[in-house]
Image (tube, rainbow, N blue to C red):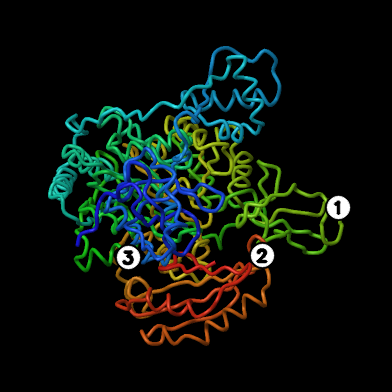
Amino acid sequence: MTRPEFYDEGALVAVLTTQPLDRLLDYKAPEGGAMLGAFVEVPLGPRKVLGIVWGPGRGDWDIKKVRSVIRVLDAAPMRAEMRTFLLKAAEYTLTPMPAMLRLATRAPGLGDPPSMRKIYRRGEGEPERSTDARRRVMETLDEYGDLSFTLKELSEMAGVTSSVVKGLVKQGVVSEEDAPRDVPFRRLDPSLPGKALTDDQAAGAAMLAEAVRSETYGTTLLRGVTGSGKTEVYLEAVAACLAQGRQALVLLPEIALTAEFLKRVQARFGARPAEWHSGATMTERRRIWRMVGQGGAQLVIGARSALFLPYQNLGLIVVDEEHDTSYKQEDGVLYNARDMAVLRASICGAHVVLASATPSLESWVNAEAGKYKRLELTSRFGPAVMPTMGTIDMRAAALPSDRWVSPDLQKAVQARIDAGEQAMLFINRRGYAPITLCRACGHQIACDQCDARMVEHRFLKRLMCHQCGETKPMPNICPSCGAEDRLAPVGPGVERLGEEAATLWPDARIATLSSDMYGSARALKAEIESIAQGGADIVIGTQLVAKGHNFPNLTLVGVIDADLGLQGSDLRAAERTFQLMRQVAGRAGRADKPGTALLQTYQPEHPVIRAILAGDEEGFWRAEAAQREAAGVPPYGRMAGIILSGPDVAAVFDIANHLARADGPLRQVGAQVYGPAPAPIARVRGRHRVRMLVKADKGVALQGALRKWVGQVQIKGDIRLAIDIDPQSFY
C-alpha cells in the first residue's frame, strides 16, 4: 500500500519538529488537510513550533488528546528527495533529525504571517538632531545601500535599541514597509556568450556540459593550476544546467570571494544570482529560501549551508576550492559540505564539480580509483605563467628578535614597489601577537574560560580568545605579579607584520587583510576590490588571501613562516601546508607580468617544502597517499572523533572511561578505540573537553557500531557527547 500524499482534515499525521525530541509527534491534520512534506505550525506545550508533515501518524496515543495542526505555512512542501537527503545525512553524521531540520529551515520568520513582516531601509533626508545612536543607524543603512533589514537586525547591527530606529521612521529618514511578497530573481540567460576559451578549457567545458545534460549523477574533479580558468570552465556547466531549466548551486569557501565572482556571473548570464551566506540580511535570506523552493532562483552562490536550501530541481553543484577546511562544520551538526554535496547530487540526479588547484587527498584518491571523473587544466590562461618558487633560509638571516621580514625579502619587495607592481606578505596568524608575556614573572595571559592564550588585537585595542571569542581590554599591569608596563607581545600576527611593513616602507600604501579588521563582509569585499584595482602597493594577509583572489598587478608573494603548519600531530599537516603554500604562491603573476613566490623557512630541506618548490603535485600526492595507506588512516581507513565535555572534569572522564571499557560493539566490527585523553585545548567556554578516537578499516559500517556503543551510557546533566564522523580537526 502506497503512502498517501495528502491527509484530509482530522487525519492523524506524524510531524517532525525542530525541537530536540527523539521522536515524531502525532497531530490531526488541520482544516483543508495537509500535504506530505508540508511546513506546519503545531502546538507543543504552551508554545507554537515549526514542523514538517513527515507521514501518517502512529495512532498509539489517546485520540481525544491529540491536538490539531494550527496551520499549514505558505511555503512549497518539502520534496521527497530533500527528505531522503536529510535522513541519509543524519544517518551518516549520527545527527538527530530535529537538528537536520533546523539546518533546512534557516529562513528567518518562515512562520510569520505576511502582515507581521516589516522591513526597514534608507528613507529621505537626514535626522533632525544627530546623536551617536542615530548616526550609527544611518551609517549602517548607507553602507548596505538598497538592502532592507528587519527591526531586530538593524538595531543589532547599529548597536542601538529598536526605539532609536522607530524614532527615525517617524522623521522619514528611515522607511518602514511591508515585506514584499515573493519576488523572483531576474532571469539568467545561459545563451549569452561566455569568454573566449583556450582549447584546453573548451574541451573541459564541453565534457562538463555533456555530463550535466545527461541528467544523471556523477562527480568530476576539475583540477587546474592557479589562474588556469577553472571558473570559466565550470560556468559553462552552469549554463548547460540553466538551459535545461534546472537549478545550479556554486559553493564558495569564503564570503569575501563572492564580490569578484558575482561580477563574472553577471557578465556571463546578464543578471545577478541569489547569494546565501551570513552576510545576507534576514529579509533577503527569507526571500531566497522561498524562491529556491518555487523555482524563482535559478542559481545560488553560497556558503556550505546553501546545500540545505529546498531546491525544486537541482541539476548541478559546484564546490569551488573543494579542499578548503571551511567546508567542514565544526559545531552543531558536524558535516563536510563537500561530502554532503556528493550525497545530495546522488539522490536528485545532479552532477557535482569539485574544483581546486590543490585537491584534497580524499578527492584525489577517488579520482585515481575511477569513482570520480578527472579533468585537468595544466597551464595558466592567456599570457600568464606559473610563478617562480624559491626559499629564503632563515637560519642564515641576521634579524632582530622583533623583526620577521628577512633582508632578501625586503629587497624583493622594494624591487616590486620601484617597478610599480604589488607585493604580498603572508602569515597565517590573525591579530597582533599570539602571546602576551610578562617580562617580570613569565606569565602568559590566558582566556578565563579556555585553556588557550589570548591573542592581542591592537586594531581593536583588546585581547581575544580565538576559541570562544571572549575579549578583554589590554591590561597595563600583569594579572599574576602586578608588575607595571612589563607586558610584551611575543611572536608576529598579521597586524604586527603590517606595523613592520610600515616601518620598512614608510611611503608605500599598505593594506592589511584579516577578517577581524572589517566591521562587515561588505567592507572586506570593498577592500579586496580596491586592491585588485591597484589601491595598495603591499598586501599583508592571513589565510583569507589564499582563496581564489585575482590581483592582476601582484607579482611577488612572500611567505613569512612557511614552517608554521608543519608543527603538531595533525595527520593532514603536510597536505594542508602543501595546499596553502601552493594556493598563496598562486596569487602571484596572474596577468601578463611574471610572478615570484619566496618562502621564508627554517627547514628548507623538509620534504613538504621541497615538494612545494618542485611543483611535483602528483609526486607529493602519491607519497602522501602511500604513508596514509600504510597507517590505515583516511582516506584508506575510517575515523570518528568522540568529544565529551562538561563543567566537571572528573564526571566527564568517568563517562569516557566507561565507554572505553565497554567497546564490545566496536570490536565486533574490528574498530579500535584510542583514549580517553584531555583534548589539546582541554577547556573551552568553561567546559572541560575529553577526546577519544575510533579507527576502523575502510569498508566497516562504523555508524551502526558507534550508535550501539554510545547508546550504552546515559548522558545526564551538563555533560555533552558529540560524534565527529571523518574529523578534520583534532583540537
Q: Secondary structure at mark 1?
A: loop
Query: Which numbered tag is attached to residue 484?
Result: 1
| Mark 1 burial class by Cα count in 10 Å: few <14, some 14-19, many 20+ | few
What kind of residue is marked 3?
Glu
Of the numbered discs 2 and 3, the one sitting upstream in the chain is: 3
Name the spot of residue 33 as percent of width and height, x first. Answer: 32, 45
Query: Which numbered tag is attached to residue 437?
Result: none
**Residue 304: in sight, yes or no?**
no
Name the spot of residue 15 as percent of width and height, x first. Answer: 40, 55
- The residues bearing labels 1 and 2 have C-alpha atoms spaced at a distance of 25 Å
Q: Secondary structure at mark 2?
A: loop
Residue on which the image places disc 3: 362
Which of discs 1 and 3 lies nearer the camera? The answer is 3
524 and 93: which is toward the camera: 93
At 39% from the left edge and 52% from the top edge, which residue is drawn?
Answer: 28
What kind of residue is marked 1?
Glu
Q: The C terminus appears in which quarter of the rendering?
A: bottom right
- The residues bearing labels 2 and 3 have C-alpha atoms spaced at a distance of 32 Å
Name the spot of residue 115 as percent of width and height, x first. Answer: 47, 28
At 62% from the left edge and 23% from the top edge, which residue is drawn?
Answer: 166
In the image, 289: left or right of 730?
left
Query: Which numbered tag is attached to residue 451?
Result: 2
**Residue 628: in sight, yes or no?**
yes
Which of discs 1 and 2 lies nearer the camera? The answer is 2
132 and 731: which is toward the camera: 132
- The residues bearing labels 1 and 3 have C-alpha atoms spaced at a distance of 52 Å
487 and 395: which is toward the camera: 487
Vertical relation: 631 (above or below) 132: below
Q: The N terminus appears in which quarter of the rendering?
A: bottom left
